[in-house]
Image (tube, grey):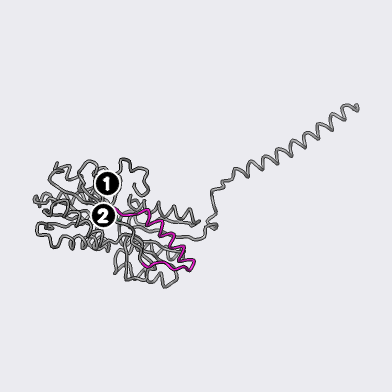
Amino acid sequence: MSRLSIVAYVVGVVCFIVSCSFSVFYGYKVVTHQLPTEEKEPNDDRYHFVLIPEELDNDYWRLVEEGARAAAKKYDVLLEYTGPRQANFDDHLKTIEMSAAAKVDGIMTQGLSDEQFSPLINRIVEKGIPVITVDTDAANSKRLAYIGTDNYYSGFLAGKALIADTNGQANVAIITGSFNKNHQRQRVQGFKDAIQSEKGIRIVAIEESQISRVRAFEKAYQILQEHPEVTAFFGTSALDGIGVAEVVEKFNKQKQIYIIGFDLLKETQKYIRKGTIQATVVQEPFEMGYRAVKMMIDLREGKKVPSTIHTATRILRKYDLPPYLNNIKGVR
Ligand code: BGC
């Protein structure tokens, strides 16, 4: 082998080694840079909280979830959102029980009834897992805090709005989410108290929708058949007014029948714009979720939190609707 070919051979080997080292080095860098930086190990989160609504896929609850997720992201909390597919006491209670058994750091849920929910909430709190009620309170339980609407007052506001809008003359039918859930009962009671001294206003029927829009439709349909004298409806949960509006349009009675509903879901908005629903009671679901998570963190860190926080409630009519609501937080 000539000297020249030896030199060429050595240079070739050196180049090969250098290029291999570069590929290994940069290859490693590329791979490590491509590791998802956003994804955290569950252990990176400070706490594991669970939010359990009465119905998982209900648009109203998805707004509460959005608020809770926003806070969870901000404060590095692992948030689980789980519960019954369709409103059902047993499934709801079972989910709460299972979350407690999994030793989560905090449970946020509704206090739907004193008989069924309070004993379970009490047991869980006694075991050292904090419980906050959201949207619906079990005020006599040992829950550490409540955040949500003042449900009695919201029903009272609805009653006063109905009096004003109908000039104190109406035969009212009520469609309520449930006869035995705390918040629904309080809304109906507030409404009844508000209209109590109005001679021109009578409640002629009250039916349950089990918070289902289809059931609200069926009940409103049946009421209009059995009570043609009805001139106004009050729907006490998020999908009731929508179900009623469908029936009223079907009977083409938009001009004769007044509807006041609850919440401001996109469909409710649509019916308000069309003039089928005249008014709705607005709650703050996003805010409830957000603040519930924040309060839970405060509790975990030994800070004091108020025992009851009432989020804002107001009546909204067509002229209160801004032209575009799609980008507003809290509308779904
Ligand atoms: C209530 C929720 C309920 C929802 C049902 C809302 O008005 O605040 O508790 O689950 O209606 O659609």
Q: For the magenta stretch, what is the residue range? A: 282-307
Q: Residue at x 22, y 49 (%)?
A: 279
Q: Residue at x 41, y 70 (%)?
A: 125
Label annotation for residue 33: none
Q: Residue at x 84, y 30 (%)?
A: 9
Label annotation for residue 320: 1
Quadrant of the image containing the N terminus? top right
Q: Position of residue 169 (x, y in %)?
A: 11, 53
Instruction: Look at mark 2 in the image and give the residue it sits on.
Output: 237
Indicate which quadrant contains ligand 1: bottom left
- Which secondary structure lies at badge 1? helix
Q: Residue at x 17, y 42 (%)?
A: 249
Decide which of 180, 234 is in the foreground and name it.
234
Q: Report which quarter residue 95 is drawn in.
A: bottom left
Tell me the crowding category of disc 2: few under 14, some 14 to 19, or many 20 or more residues within 10 angstroms, Cα based.
many
Confirm whether the magenta stretch covers residue 251.
no
Indicate left or right for 313 with 42 as reference.
left
- Which secondary structure lies at badge 2? loop
Decide which of 325, 285 is in the foreground and name it.
325
Chief secondary structure of the magenta span?
helix
The yes-or-no answer for disc 2 within 8 Å of ligand 1 is yes
Mark 1 vs mark 2: in front: 1
| Three-letter code for the amino acid on which mark 1 is drawn | Asp
- From the viewer's perspective, is residue 93 above or below residue 85? below
Distance between the Cα atoms at labels 1 and 2?
A: 20 Å
Q: Position of residue 96 (x, y in %)?
A: 38, 63
Q: Position of residue 119 (x, y in %)?
A: 34, 71
* First in residue order: circle 1 vs circle 2: 2
The yes-or-no answer for disc 1 within 8 Å of ligand 1 is no
Q: Position of residue 33 (x, y in %)?
A: 61, 43
| Three-letter code for the amino acid on which mark 2 is drawn | Ser
